[in-house]
Image (tube, helix red, strand yellow):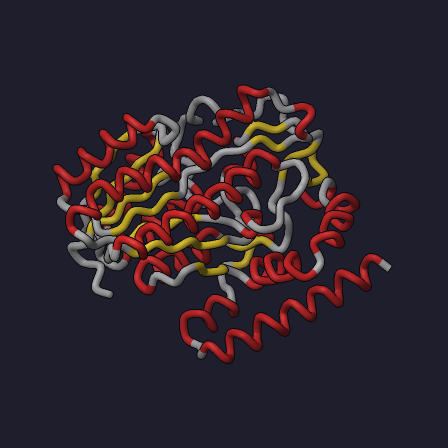
């Protein structure tokens, strides 16, 4: 697709995956509507879009507030024109056993990660339905299928996004709407969230290895926005996690009970002055990457197959990955 003159909205655009998505769309010539709470990161993202020759509109908003999302959408359309693609990406979480999370914290994480997606989808649909065109991309996770301990708010929200998206998809089909709807399931990524999402763990949170750079996710999201598959799994670990859970969900429960705590923490104690972005944005422009650059990979052979291979090749590759992964898990547990 020729993205030049296309208008793309990205929520959570100031950092992490959202920032990488903004850069990827901008590199293809798209104009960007940037939605997030943190103005420093939004300005940084805007500058990067303009460096690529595109236009960018900042719409500072909290996606947990439906009115703010609607106002942001209105402003973006007034300044850029009709929205062609809307990417729901904003998230936050609390790294903690459920017993240590307050109701207010759980509600907030759910409102941002789940209801923020709902509100963004509603605002996009109000505009796309009138024109009978457009694409909505829901940024999901392998954790939308296989929940893990210490991330109940995030896992619950991503499961909810998947159910919400499936419901909406049937409605669009029933109405004959020419609106694309796709969900992109992501692997563990090196983003700033592990340095600022609220935590009650003794050590610094980390993505469960192996870790991918956010650019891997961004390329998958842009590809999905163009080709609009029902779902797209980014990274071999995502396919392994989802398919493995379908086959052996009970085994996954016990494996995570044994390994899920250590796997989500580094060996370094949590900084007592660590910031938290749960209720307020963390000042500064933090870019796309977190602190795990030395351990993260910026490529995915599985994603290359998805973009360039045949359906038979993809099926064979996925089956081989699942079989190999399950074999390794069984050997590790013996």
Which residue occupies the foreground of this view, 247 or 327?
Answer: 247
Residue 293 seen in the figure: no
Position of 295 with respect to 325 (left or right) is: left
Residue 46 higher or lower than 305, as above or below:
above
Observer able to see residue 305: yes
The spot of residue 145 in percent (x, y) is 57, 51
Q: 196 above or below 82?
A: above
Q: How many labels does the image show?
A: 0
Residue found 22% across the figure and 29% down from its top: 71
Query: Which quadrant: the C terminus?
Result: bottom right
**Residue 72, how many percent across, how many down?**
24, 32
Residue that sits furthest to the front in the current view: 174
Res 29 → quadrant: bottom left
Q: Is residue 67 above or below residue 31?
A: above
| Residue at 63 percent of width and 69 percent of height | 321
For this view, does 37 lie left or right of residue 270? left
Say which of 143 and 230 sits in front. 230
Task: Give left or right: position of 139 versus 22.
Answer: right
Residue at 29% from the left image edge and 31% from the top image edge: 69
Q: Which residue is drawn at 30% across and 56% down?
A: 180
Q: Quadrant of the N terminus?
A: bottom left
Whole-percent x, y for residue 296 in the image? 56, 54
The residue closer to the viewer here, 132 or 251, is: 132
Where is residue 38? Give x, y as percent. 36, 29
């Amino acid at each position: 697709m020729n993205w030049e003159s296309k208008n793309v909205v990205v929520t959570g655009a100031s950092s992490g995956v959202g920032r990488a998505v903004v850069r990827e769309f901008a590199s293809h010539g798209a104009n960007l509507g940037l939605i997030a709470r943190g103005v420093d990161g939004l300005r940084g993202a805007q500058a990067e879009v303009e460096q690529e020759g595109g236009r960018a509109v900042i719409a500072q908003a909290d996606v947990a507030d439906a009115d703010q999302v609607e106002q942001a959408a209105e402003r973006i359309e007034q300044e850029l024109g009709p929205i062609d693609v809307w990417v729901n990406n904003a998230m936050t979480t609390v790294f903690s056993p459920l017993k240590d999370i307050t109701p207010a914290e759980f509600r907030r994480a759910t409102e941002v990660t789940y209801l923020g997606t709902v509100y963004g989808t509603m605002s996009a649909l109000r505009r796309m339905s009138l024109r009978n065109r457009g694409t909505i991309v829901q940024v999901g996770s392998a954790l939308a299928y296989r929940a893990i301990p210490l991330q109940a708010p995030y896992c619950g929200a991503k499961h909810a996004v998947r159910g919400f998206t499936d419901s909406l998809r049937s409605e669009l089909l029933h109405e004959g709407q020419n609106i694309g709807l796709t969900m992109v399931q992501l692997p563990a990524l090196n983003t700033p969230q592990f340095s600022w999402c609220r935590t009650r763990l003794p050590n610094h949170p980390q993505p469960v290895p192996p870790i991918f750079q956010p650019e891997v996710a961004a390329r998958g999201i842009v590809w999905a926005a163009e080709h609009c598959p029902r779902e797209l799994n980014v990274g071999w670990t995502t396919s392994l996690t989802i398919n493995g859970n379908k086959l052996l969900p009970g085994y996954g429960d016990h494996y995570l009970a044994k390994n899920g705590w250590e796997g989500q923490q580094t060996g370094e104690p949590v900084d007592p002055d660590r910031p938290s972005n749960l209720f307020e944005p963390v000042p500064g422009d933090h870019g796309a990457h977190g602190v795990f650059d030395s351990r993260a990979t910026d490529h995915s052979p599985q994603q290359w197959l998805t973009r360039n291979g045949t359906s038979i090749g993809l099926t064979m590759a996925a089956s081989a990955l699942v079989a190999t992964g399950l074999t390794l898990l069984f050997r590790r547990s013996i």
